[in-house]
Image (cartoon, rainbow, N blue to C red):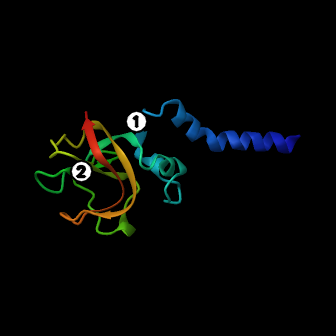
Amino acid sequence: MHRRSLLATATVFLAAPALLRAADPDGPLKIRELYEKTGDMSQLALGLEGERVTFEGYMAPPLKADAQFFVLTKRPMAVCPFCESSAEWPSDILAIYTKRVIDVIPFNVGIESRGVLEIGEYKDPETGFVSMVRLTDATYSD
């Protein structure tokens, strides 16, 4: 009987993030929810791939003027955390690709961005920016 109780309790704890997400599927996600502690993509992220989701964070200063993408960070950053390769991709940023040229929001103002979650290495042909995870067809607001 103790073994069954332990297994039932463990199952509840393991399923808790998915249950919370299921309770509010349209609520903003945090960038940290994309990754396991090992740096691998989380089950939540893999389950949301291809879905329209919302993330909260901060807009890092864009790499260039008239850009159609920016980097969403979990904390304010005065400089863009540009990465040269997927091996160096930090687990606390998210590339955001929009349909239109972005209007820059100050780096210390919290925003929400909504778009389609894509996972896997992608190199922007125009800037060379490499991302491992991103939102496409995205919108944002403060």
Q: CA distance from mark 1 to mark 2?
A: 18 Å
Q: Residue furthest top?
A: 23
What x and y, as percent, mark residue 115? 33, 43
* Vertical placement of residue 103 versus 67, above or below: above
Residue kind at label 1, given as amino acid type: Pro
Instruction: Tell which of 80 and 50 is nearer to you.
Output: 50
54 vs 76, left or right, is right
Q: Is residue 128 left or right of residue 43?
A: left
Which element type, helix, strand or loop, lies under badge 2?
A: strand
**Badge number at residue 70:** 2
Residue at (42% x, 32% y) in the render = 27
Assign a secondary structure to mark 1.
loop
Q: Residue at x 89, y 40 (%)?
A: 1
Q: Position of residue 87 (x, y in %)?
A: 39, 69
Tell me: 21 left or right of 88: right
Q: Decide which of tag 1 and tag 2 comes sooner along the chain.
A: 1
**Count of number-bearing discs:** 2
Q: Residue at x 54, y 51 (%)?
A: 43
In the displayed structure, would residue 119 be above or below residue 30?
below
Which residue has dot 1 on it? 28
Q: Residues within 10 Å of mark 1 (few under 14, many from 20)?
A: some
Q: Image point 41% across, 47% down: which residue? A: 31
- Residue 63 lies left or right of residue 95; in this view the side is left
State the quadrant of the C terminus: top left
Marks 1 and 2 close (CB-CB < 8 Å): no
The amino acid at mark 2 is: Phe
Label 2: how many residues lie within 10 Å, few (<14), some (14-19) or many (20+)? many
Residue found farthest to the left: 65
- Seen from this angle, which residue lies furthest right? 1
How far across and down, in percent of the image, does residue 74 sit? 36, 46
